[in-house]
Image (cartoon, rainbow, N blue to C red):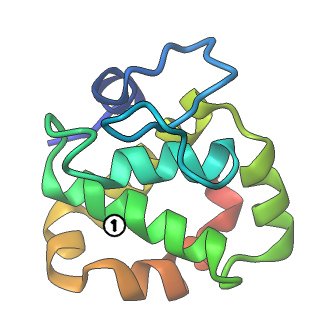
Amino acid sequence: MTVTAAQIAKAARIAPRTKRFVLRDEYGFAYDGNRTEHVLAAIGSVHHTPDLDQATHIAARALYKCFTTGRMNIQLASDVRQRSPYQLCKMIAHIVNGVGADALLAYSVGPVADYWINEHRDEF
């Protein structure tokens, strides 16, 4: 099954023209971090996006890990930071479809964050 950016965005309540996205806890307090971190954390969390499948959550967590831990190519990191929330949904869909849901479930976050994303940076 192919995952689309529209499916991911709908689950995270992101519209195609969304510019501002703030992740809040159950009390309404905003989480630390920038917009990119908020989007990736929301999509990677089963609590915030329960309608998404496990492979999509793993892809979002891998992109988050790659972005926040210095594993990401510096040019790609700069590009990711500038992307809109909907464009981040497209990146996550590309990762799910590129790696494959079964492989994501088997490999989990580490290999995707550490290798796959940087190896395929020209595709984003």
Q: Return the residue nearer the eye: 120 or 76.
A: 76
In the picture, measured across the screen, residue 42 lies left or right of residue 123, that is: left
Q: Residue at x 15, y 39 (%)?
A: 50
**Image height check: is 39 above or below 57?**
above
Q: Residue furthest front?
A: 27
Q: Return the residue nearer the eye: 29 or 120.
A: 29
Quarter of the image for residue 51 reads top left
Looking at the rendered image, the quarter that the N terminus falls into is: top left
**Image height check: is 123 above or below 35?**
below
Q: Is residue 67 visible?
A: yes
Q: Is residue 91 visible?
A: no
Classed neighbour count for the residue bearing mark 1: other residues with Cα under 10 Å, few (<14), some (14–19), many (≥20): some
Q: Return the residue nearer the eye: 103 or 41.
A: 41
Q: Residue at x 52, y 74 (%)?
A: 65
Q: Where in the figure is residue 70, as x and y percent of width and height?
A: 71, 83
Q: Which residue is mark 1?
A: 99
Q: Residue at x 64, y 69 (%)?
A: 67
In the picture, measured across the screen, residue 60 lies left or right of residue 124, that is: left
Q: Residue at x 30, y 36 (%)?
A: 26
Q: Where in the figure is residue 53, as x and y percent of width and height?
A: 14, 48
In the picture, measured across the screen, residue 87 lies left or right of residue 51, that is: right
Q: Where in the figure is residue 121, as x and y percent of width and height?
A: 67, 66
Three-letter code for the amino acid on which mark 1 is drawn: Val
Q: Secondary structure at mark 1?
A: helix
Report how many numbered discs are placed on residues in the image.
1
**Image height check: is 5 above or below 56?**
above
Q: Where in the figure is residue 68, as x and y percent of width and height?
A: 64, 72
